[in-house]
Amino acid sequence: MACATLEDMPTSLQSHHSTPAASVSRWWLCLLGLLALLPLEPAAAALADDRRESIVERAGTLPRSHTLLVAIDGETVIDEGFRGHATDETANIKSLSKTLISALVGAAIDRGVIESVDQPIVELLGARVPADVDPRVNDITVGNLLSMQAGLERTSGGNYGAWVASSNWVSDALARPFDAEIGGRMRYSTGNSHLLSAALTEVTGRSTLALARDWLGDPLGISIPPWTRDPQGIYFGGNEMGLTPQALLRFGEMVRQRGRYGGQTVLSTDWIERSWQPRTRSFFNGDDYGYGWFITELAGEPVYYGWGYGGQLLYVIPSRAMTVVMTSDPMPPSNGSNYVNRVETLIGDLIEATGNHNDEERTT
């Protein structure tokens, strides 16, 4: 059976009223045959079925994995739950919420609510700053808190329990002694992120939850439920936030697309670039750190990720147009650096299994 050329098909279709039914049927069969020969969309072609199945199987055998989501070119190619968990169920993302707090700070700067990352935090906190703190606290900027370079003693690790048991988390975090120079080495501290949440609340007169729903939830089309608050009612800035893995994927996709999602600008491209600029380095894993994002390299590609206790992970790999979400048991017996290493080996193999999508050209 001979087929009309692509150029001839519109003419044939226009005269279908005088074409016998059998000829029309042959024409549609030819059209379907030609469509079958067209190349697959990049996302569908990027991950072969056997590689996908291998990645899913390996993710499922990790000792405490709950979900795995992978999007390539904006198309979800893996959506799997393990051990009775699903990607549309709310998960405690632990310290991965620091990455969301960073985004809220960026949104506040984009709107002129916060002047810049160089603004002293005391200007934003106002009366929430205790009168008797070390004068050096006046020199701590928004950027210092975002990059974990405030210099104050950590409220994380062994100090965490006493901090969250205190009557005023903001005062307690600011009253801690300095054990590093401001702007110096990284001192990872959830208190830093909580100070940012308090600053957002103080300067806007709105809760961090309301801001998150307005500035992130609405444009991304995701639900953001309430989470833990401190004794003064400030939403925990840097821990205990609950989101579904699917919501995390949308957030990651927005960041991958330099702040845009669904035709809307959620964050400025400038803020994404600032967030991904290395400013210090983690003592725990050796990776660089920007504003709420760790920065590393996997399978030879630059990778930006947020990390929450127990293995709550969001990876953005621009050169592969890829976003990966992994959630895990949020209450393991240890913080699981070895577990994260195993996850990153898996992500590295996933990167190698895909082609180079040159996302830089696509999103600029």
Image: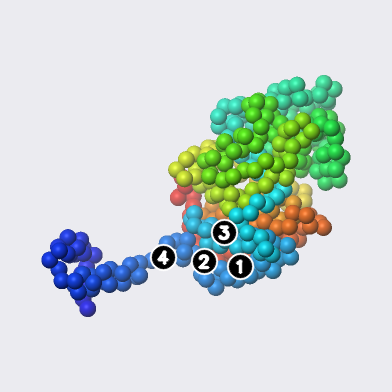
Instruction: Tell me the SS state at disc 4.
Output: loop
Vertical relation: 347 (above or below) 93: below
Instruction: Tell me the SS state at disc 1.
Output: helix
In this rendering, position of residue 131 left or right of residue 88: right
Residue 181 position by quadrant = top right
| Distance of label 4 from label 3 (alpha carbons) | 18 Å
Residue position marked by numbered label 1 in the rendering: 55
* Residue 69 seen in this snapshot: yes
Identified by mark 4, the residue type is Leu
Q: Are marks 3 and 2 in contact (CB under 8 Å)?
A: yes
Q: Earlier in the sequence, mark 2 or mark 1?
A: 2
Judging depth in this view, the residue of 30 and 107 nearest the camera is 30
Q: Are marks 2 and 1 in contact (CB under 8 Å)?
A: yes
* Disc number for residue 40: 4
Q: Residues within 10 Å of mark 3 (few under 14, many from 20)?
A: many
| Distance of label 3 from label 2 (alpha carbons) | 10 Å
Q: Earlier in the sequence, mark 4 or mark 3?
A: 4
> Percent from the top left, x then y, of residue 97?
68, 44
Q: Earlier in the sequence, mark 4 or mark 1?
A: 4
Residue position marked by numbered label 2 in the rendering: 47
- Which residue lies at the image location 49% right of the left edge and 54% below the top edge? 74
| Distance of label 4 from label 1 (alpha carbons) | 21 Å
Residue position marked by numbered label 3 in the rendering: 70
Identified by mark 1, the residue type is Ile
Identified by mark 2, the residue type is Leu
Q: Residues within 10 Å of mark 2 (few under 14, many from 20)?
A: many
